[in-house]
Structure formats: C-alpha cells, structure tokens
Amino acid sequence: MNERRFRTACVCLGVGVVVLAAGPVSGQEGPKGPLYDNTYAKDFIMDAPWRVIDGETAIPITIILKDCDVDDIRELHWIRIWDVTGGGSALLWDHDFDDERIGDDPSEDNFWTYITTVTEGHAGLPDGTPLTPANLGYGAGDAVQLKVSVYYRDDIINYTNSRYLRVQVGHGAFPWPEDWYGGDTHYHTMYTNNLYEFGVPVPAVGLSAVAMGLHWLTATDHSCDLDETGDGSYSYATHQWEYTVQSPSGTQTVYRDNPSYGSSWNALGADVSDLDSPEFRLYRGVEINVASVDGDSWQKTLHALFYNPDYIHSPLSGALGERPVYPSLPDGLDALAAGGFAYAAHPLSDLSAEWAGLDWGVNGAIWGDEDLETALGSAKFRGLEAFNTRRTRYSSNQNNPWADFDAGVPPDDPYPNELLAGIALWDDLLVADLAGDGPRKVFFTGGSDAHGDLNYSSHLGLDNYATDNAIGKVQTVVYVPGGYGPGNLPPVSAILDALRAGRAVVTDGPFLEIGLDRDGDGDWYEAGDLAIGDDGVAGPAASLPLRIRWASLPEFGPAVSVDLVAGSADGTTTLLSFNPNDAGQGYSGNTTFDLATLGLGGMHYLRAELLTDDGDAGHRAHTNPIWILFDQISAAASAASTGIADLDLAVSPNPFNPAVAITFSIPDGSDLSPVSLRIYDCRGQHVRTLVDAASVGGLHRAVWDGTDADGAPVASGVYFCRLCWDGRSRTQRMVLLK
C-alpha cells in the first residue's frame, strides 16, 4: 500500500431508470448498476494490460465478478467487448451466459473470473481469432480503446456496468540488453483482500504481465491478509473461486479450494507454484506490517517488502482495534531466514489518515531516522524501494477516466516528486555510510504497488477515483548471466540473488547501465572489471574507462539527459552530464568516461541516472552504484619510487566488532594479475570472498563487515583472512567479539 487509501466504508445505492424484465432483450442494456465498497456487495472489475509488446501480441481481457456471496447476480445475461477507438463501436466479443446465477455456487462466491484472448461474435473475424492489435487493424504506437460491459439482473432490475480501457501497442520488447530481466518487485494479487483494497487473481496477472513484456513479478500481498483462513475484522480470505481462460486452443475452467491449503499464504504459494515457468517467473513475497522504533512514530505501522521462503506472523493491519502491529522492525528482520532479505517499502509515503487527533487508517508513518538506522544494522536489510508507483494523472471517473487523463488532470503529489525525494534520501544514506566505516551497501529498487490495476488504478469508496498507475509501470531490471533468454528465463533463485546483491537498474521504461572496463575491451563483466553492485580498488593506472550505455523506445521518448553522479564522505557531485539526443543517440547509445583524469582519492560510489522527453513528465532510469576505493596511497608511493617489494597483509582492529579493515600490498611494478582475498572460519570452511579480481602492484584496502556470502552475520569466534597472488599467499588470524 502506498498512499492514504482509508475511506469510510459505505453501501452506495444506485438510483436509475428501472427496467423490469424477466430476461434480457437481445442487444438491450439497462441503467448503470450500483457501485459498492469492497466486501459489502458485488464489484465489477474489467481489465486489460496498459501495454502489449507489439501488434502481434494478443490482448488478454479479464472480467471479475467479486463478492457475489454477499449480493449475488440473479441472472448474468451477457458480457460484451467493443473496440471504441476514435469513437467507433466494433463488437469484438459477445458471450451469452444464459442467465446463469452467480453466487449460488461456493466457487463463484468471491472471485468469479473470465479471461479471453480471442474474438467471439466479431462481424469480420472467425471466433477464436487472437485479439491482437494487428488483427484489429492497429500497429506500433497506436492506442486501442476498449469498452467492456456486463449486463445482468440484480433482484428485479436489469443493469449494465461498463468500463473503458486503453491498450498501448508497443514498439517491441522493453529495451533491456542480453542478460537483463525486468519485473515488478511490489504487486498485490487477489490475496490482498480487505475493506479498502483488493487485487486480481494470479492467472490474470501472469497473462497480462507476459503480454506487456515483463519477465518476472513478486507477489507482495499484505501480511495481515495472508494469515487469514476466514473473514477477520478487516481482512477476508477467499475460500473457493474459479477462473476460466478462453484462448485459441479452447476454453478451460479451473476451480480452486483455498481452505485446503490452510491459509491465504499457502494458497498464494500454490498459485505461484502452478504458474511459475521459464516463460514467466513468479515469486511469493510479502508486504509486511512492522512496528516503528523511531521516537517520533513509536509503534506506528511501517511497510517492508520481505523476500523470504516462510510466512512471518504479522496478522494485524494497524487499523482501529488492530494496533499496534507486530513484530517490531528489528524483530521482523531477525525473523528472516538465512537467505531472506528486505527492502523498505515506499519509505517516504505517509500511511497515516489522521482526523480529530486520531488515525482512522492503518496508524502509519514514514520510515524515521531511527528506523533506518536500526534496519541498516541488519545485513538482511538491503535498501529502499524508493521508486513506488507512477502517478501522473487523476480522474474522479473510475470507469472511464480517459477524458481527465488526456486533459492532464494531475493527482496529489504527482510523479516524480516522491521519487526524487527518495533518491535524495538514498544519497544521504550512502554518503553517511562512507563517512563512517563504509561501504555498507544500500541498494535501490522500484515497484508499481498496483492492487490488480492492469490498465490503470481504480479506487472504490466515498471518494471514487482513478490514477494512471498500473502493474509494471515501474520496473526493476536485474542482471543474471548464464545464457538465459525469452522462453528460458533464469530461475527465481537467480533473480532474487541479483535483487539481494543490487545488480539492478530501476526504471519506468528506458534502460541505463554503467561499468568499469579496466582493459577497455568493451566487456565490463570480466575478471578485474566492476559492474553495478560491485566494489573494488582502483590503483594508479593510465586510464580507468567507465562505460555508460542506454536505450529507450518511442513510447517513452528519447533520452535527453544522462548524469554520472559520484558520492563520497563529503557529499555528492555530478561528474558528467550530457544529452544523447543531441548526438542522434536518443534511443540507443554508449560512451566512455575516463575516471583516471579526475584525481579522485578515497572511497566513492558512482551511479547514473537518465531522463527522456515524452512531451510530458518524461521517463527515468537509475542504476545502483559501483563502489570504488581510489587508492591514492599506492599512487603516491609509486610516484615517489619508494616501492613495495613484498606481498603483505595486515588487519585492524583485532579483535574487532562489527568490521575489520584489511590492508594488503602487492609488489610494485607488478602487471595486472589475479588477486584473491578470502575469509575462512576456524574449521577451514569458506565464509566470504572479499576480492577476486585482477589488480596492479601497490597498497590496497578492503573491509569485512562480519557477514557471510549471503549477507548474514557470522558468529563470534576466530577467523582467518587469506591473500593469494602469483602462487604466493599470506594469512592473518582475526577474532570477532560480539
């Protein structure tokens, strides 16, 4: 959850022209049906992806009839889909449901779902023709406008509920290079189901995400919803439900019995397991409620994204009667498994909804200074999900918002305000770390925080409204080498490893990457090079070529600004800024910047950011940093010709807690050659590799923070640091005291 979504629950009774009928008349529609708050009565959800890859990609259209256990549909007459682009009205899909009653069968109670990717009843195309833009006469750059209508009888009145959708036909796959895979780190499915919010079933999510070009997604439903086995005070478990998929190969209906899994967490896990495949990767995470430990927001609700194999018990929402939430932030981090990790969800979003001195919402707060300090004390905390949602438009018409969207009506606090504030917070944390014993790496991710919302985001309550945020509008793109590709995507474990290690770019469309290419051969993934998320030492060298490459698509606009930002203990500065479009490289290009010309000294981090020009708010991409210790001591020694004659290794302080500085020297005049610096425990088992790269002669420095290769803190005891170079080695004994 990313904004103030608390709304007083109510039942809104629709008033309209009454059409009394025992059954429908062919082609007839009734008045607009009543709209209800979630859980009080039925909801109508019609959705489609906001983008498809190209003209040959079928558009999956999803229809959901929700909460029919509370207020059933006496007769479902028909559902129809029209192409209404440019004011037209071409019938694409016309399905007669023979006055079926929805809600009299347990599987229909909460999420009756129908997904189609083909035509039915089209005047010029055979039934079963894929609903591709090309088949409908559209191509790259076009926007297909759809109208989806449900005609039904509620008691004695026939109603029609309609929603208008717009699907952008893309210019191809997202502009991600080989070995880079993009997804959404923060997304809510049907298992987020409470008084204020709900998502859509996982099968609809998978079909839509693939159609728009995403490679993976982490389902991060609310912890207070995932513990449910029945209906709680604010959260509601889905018991039985069904979904039907109509495709060129036929029509199939699947029935699910969630109570058999014991909890919503387990049911979500079953859905994810069924649908995770080499064509699209899915992972079950959680947006967990944890209690703040900051003095200004003590025990108020914070949200964190936990990527963990097991459910961590957090059953309370923070709403009235369910506060304070638990666990506390430090207890939640401690509960993560050895391979689990966490990011702060939307750390600057104020989740409070105070009125008359009382928080009527989830009793929320932003992440305070003490919260961040506490989190950074845990190796399982990896950073900030500071790019959360992309809202540029607002409408009070949640079923047809396009007039307002096209007119440019802005929401409160529009994009990129919160993003830029999050970047500033991130820089502050990185700089403060370098001023201490750094680098304690703090990474950056992004996610849509969409709740269903395949086409745009709709909110139902007293303040019904829509914004243009949707699934995949914010993407985290991770680097996973290994010969994978479309149809053979990396396993989820490899994607999570990259997310944990910060090998990621955060974007809402374009792509950007940096890498230190020491030998200048155009490949910055070789031994001795440094890529995003890496850290290393740069000694004296004739050149230190930093490679920068970027890409965009016409739908996102050309890149018009690329900035290379450096941070040190003294603050941040922009080392390089240029406009690729001026050189005709707005949609694809690369450049090289020689860091050796700057005379940098000490520890720095380098990151890059990109902005496009789409005629509106633009689109942005941000890399995670590379951390480099510019070894001026070695440079000075070389310049003075004092020389370092032997291989040496020293550690300080010893004993240590929590970190130890390791200084090692390689004989002066040595060519670029492999060096390894590894930590072993008292049994001789490998704990962590600190350096495994090519290096030149001179004095170098590394820091071990007392964690293993997975980032987990190690126990107190005796450890050994071993340096290897040119067939020779040195070892130092160290003692970690806690």
Image: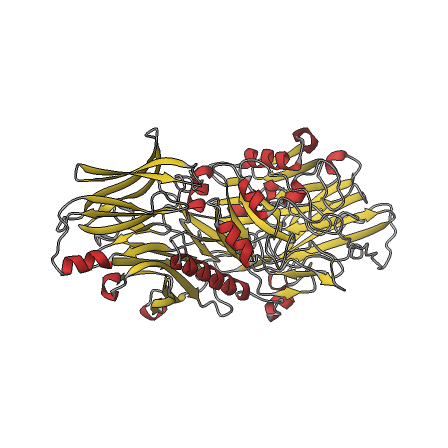
Q: Give how far across and how far down residue 17 sits, in percent.
A: 85, 59
Q: Give how far across and how far down residue 60 sits, in percent.
A: 58, 46
Image quarter (top left, top right, bottom left or bottom right) of the C terminus: top left
Q: Give how far across and how far down residue 431 sits, in percent.
A: 41, 61
Residue name at image x 42 percent, y 44 percent: 498
Is 146 or 545 nearer to us in this picture? 545
Q: How many marks?
A: 0
245 left or right of 691 in image: right
Residue name at image x 63 percent, y 35 percent: 267
**Residue 597 image-quadrant placement:** bottom left
Q: Is residue 132 visible?
A: no
Residue 211's place in the image compared with 107, above or below, is below
**Residue 221 image-quadrant placement:** top right
Q: Give how far across and how far down residue 276 sits, in percent.
A: 52, 37
Is 241 or 705 nearer to us in this picture? 705
573 left or right of 121 in image: left
Is 264 or 301 nearer to us in this picture? 301
Residue name at image x 88 percent, y 51 percent: 20
